[in-house]
Amino acid sequence: MNTSRLEAFSDGVLAIIITIMVLELSAPAEPSWEGLRQVLPVFLSYLLSFAFVGIYWNNHHHLVHLAGKVNGTVLWANLHLLFWLSLIPFSTRWMQQTDFAQVPVLTYGIDLLLSAIAFLMLRVALVRQDGPDGHLARALRDDRKGKLSPLLYLVGMAATLVHPWIGLGTYAIVALMWLLPQRRIERYVAQLNE
C-alpha cells in the first residue's frame, strides 16, 4: 500500500487538532493592553502546543516521504501517534483553565512524552517495513534529538513537581530544539536526486 492515504488522513487530523486549539482561545474581556496581558499565558501555551503539533506534522511528512509503502503495523502506529496528539487540545485547555496548576502541567508533559514515544514507534514500524538498508533507515541514523526528547520530557515532568512553570520551560526547550532545522533527511533526499 502506498503512503498517500496515510499522509492525507494524518494531515486532516492534525489540521483538526490545530483548529480545535484555536477555537478554544478566548479574546480578552477588556479592550486594553492590560486585558491582553492577562491572557498572555493562555496565548503562550497555545503557541507552545501549536509548535509541537507543527513539529510533528513536519517530521511526519519527512518520514512518510522517505517510506516507500506502509502496512497494517504502520497504520496502527500512525493512529497511536494521532491519538496522543489529539489529546494536546485537552491538556492545553486544562492547563489554561487551572492557571497552570501542577497536575494539569504534569498531564501535559505526559501527553508530550507519550506522543514522542508513539512517534518513535511509528519510525520503527516504517524502518522495519522499508528494511534496515532502506532509505529511511539510512536517513535516520544518529538521531540525537529523537533520543533526547523523551528524556527532556521526563526532566520537565520532574521539574513540574518543583514548580509548573519550570516544567513548562523545559517542554519549551524541547520545542525550540526541534524548531532548529534538521536537514539530515532533506540532505539525504537531495543526494538521492543527484
Image (spheres, grey):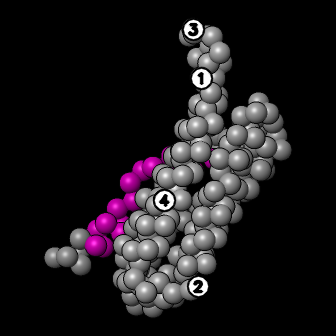
Specify the label residue 39 is tagged with. Answer: none
* Mark 2 neighbour density, 10 Å: few (under 14) some (14–19) many (20 or more): some
Query: Quarter of the image holding residue 75?
Result: bottom right
Mark 1 vs mark 2: which is more N-terminal? 1
Give amino acid for label 3: Ser
Q: Residue at x 23, y 71 (%)?
A: 190
SS assignment at label 4: helix
Q: Amino acid at mark 4?
A: Gly
Please tell me whether mark 2 sits on a helix, a strand or a loop: helix
Between residue 19 and residue 35, name the one nearer to us.
19
The Cα–Cα distance between marks 3 and 2, rounded to whole angstroms, is 52 Å
- The mark that comes first in sequence, 1 or 4, is 4
Residue mark closest to the camera, 4 vs 2: 4
Query: Is residue 18 in the magenta section?
Result: no
Q: Earlier in the sequence, mark 4 or mark 3?
A: 4
Calculate the distance from the C-alpha at mark 1 to the C-alpha at mark 4. 26 Å
Spot occupied by residue 194 in the image (x, y as percentages of width and height) = 16, 76
Say which residue appears at 54% left-offset and 81% top-offset: 74
Which range is magenta? 171-189
Q: Is residue 174 magenta?
A: yes
Tag 3 residue: 32
Q: Is residue 143 above or below residue 137?
A: above
Label pair 1/4, CB-CB below 8 angstroms: no
Residue type at mark 1 is Ala
Amino acid marked by disc 2: Thr
Q: CA distance from mark 1 to mark 2?
A: 43 Å
User: Circle 1 is placed at which residue position?
Assistant: 27
Residue at numbered disc 2: 73
Q: CA distance from mark 1 to mark 3?
A: 11 Å
Mark 1 or mark 3, earlier in chain: 1
Q: Mark 4 against mark 3, which lies toward the viewer?
A: 4
